[in-house]
Amino acid sequence: MPMTDTTPLPPLPDRLSIDPRSPFHLPAAFANEVAIKFNDKERTDVEEYCISEGWIRVPAGKSVDRKGQPLLIKLKGKVEAFYR
């Protein structure tokens, strides 16, 4: 018997960050796996996204700032967020 979950998933916000220090961090959105499509290709390294402005932030190689956080670069393009 297949297990079906009838509880609806919360809608994904327009802007979301995985960094808990960010004002755009929404822990409830991470209860399920969030996937990002950028320019029709699925990305697994996205730290933050904004659908309406059309950008994502990803780590710039292995560079880190003085607090040990990865340095991020902003890429512009078509952004789609969905639950996996």
Image (cartoon, grey):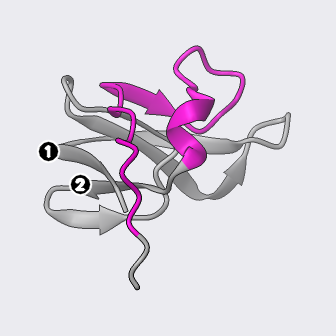
Residues in magenta?
4-31
Say the numbered circle drawn on residue 13: none
> Spatial distance from mark 1 to mark 2, Cα to Cα?
6 Å
Q: Position of residue 55 (x, y in %)?
A: 28, 36
At 15% from the left edge and 56% from the top edge, which residue is drawn? 39
Vertical position of residue 38 compared to residue 15: above or below: below
Q: Is residue 11 magenta?
A: yes
Q: Residue furthest right?
A: 67
Q: Is residue 28 magenta?
A: yes
Q: Earlier in the sequence, mark 1 or mark 2?
A: 2
Q: Which residue is mark 1?
A: 78
Q: Residue furthest front?
A: 1
Q: Which residue is mark 2?
A: 38
Vertical position of residue 64 compared to residue 26: above or below: below
Q: Which quadrant, please, contains the N terminus? A: bottom left
Image-based side of 55 in relation to 6, left or right: left
Quarter holding residue 52: top left
**For this rendering, which residue is in front, 8 or 46?**
8
Quarter holding residue 3: bottom left
State yes or no: discs 1 and 2 in contact (Cβ < 8 Å).
yes
